[in-house]
Image (cartoon, rainbow, N blue to C red):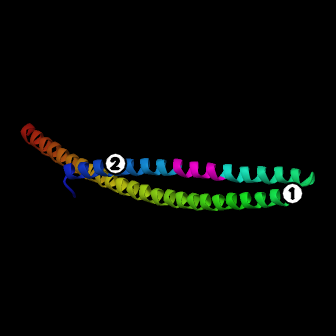
Amino acid sequence: MANPSALVTLIELAVKDSDDAARRLGEALRAAEETEKKLEMLLGYRDEYASRFQSNQANGISAMEYRNFQLFIDKLDTAISGQQTIVDNARHRVDGERKSWQECERKRMSYDTLASRAETARQHKENKRDQKQMDEYAARSAMYKR
C-alpha cells in the first residue's frame, strides 16, 4: 500500500486539480451561455427586421429600399452564421472541460478509495493486534489463577 502521507498529498493535489477543472467548466458554461444569448439576439433582430420589412412592403417600397433590405439581411445572416460558429466552439469547449473535470473527479475518487482501503487495512491490523494482546492477557490471567 502507498505511504499514507504520499496518499494524502495525492488526494490534496487531485482535489486542487478537480477544483480547477470545475472552475474552468463553470467559466466555459458561462461563456457558452453568453454566446447563445448573442445568437438569440441576432436571430430576434433578424426576425423583427424581416417582419418590419414585410409590413412596409405592403405599403409599397422602392427598388433601392428593397436592395438595402437584402444587403442588410445578408449582413445579418453572415453575423448569425459567425455567431453560430462561436456557439458551436463554446459548446465544444464545454464538452472538453466537462470531460476534464470528470477525469479529475475519477482520479480524486480513486485516491479516496485507496485511502479508505488503507485505513480499513490499518484498522484491521490494529484490531488483530488488540485481539492478540487480549488473548495473551486472558491466557496469562488463567495461568496465574491456577
Dot label at residue 15: 2
Q: Nearer the viewer, residue 6 or 36?
A: 36
Q: Nearer the viewer, residue 25 or 6?
A: 25
Across and down, in percent, residue 134 comes to: 17, 42
CB under 8 Å between callouts 2 and 1? Answer: no
Label 2 sits on what residue type?
Val
Say left or right for 60 vs 105.
right
Disc 2 crowd rating (10 Å Cα; few below 14, some 14-19, many 20+) is some
Q: Residue at x 71, y 62 (%)?
A: 74
Label 1 sits on what residue type?
Ser
Q: Residue at x 29, y 47 (%)?
A: 12
Which region of the structure is painted magenta?
30-39
Q: Nearer the viewer, residue 57 or 50?
A: 57
Residue annotated with mark 1: 62
Residue 36 falls within the magenta-colored stretch: yes
**Count of residue discs:** 2
Is the stretch drawn in magenta largely helix, strand or loop?
helix
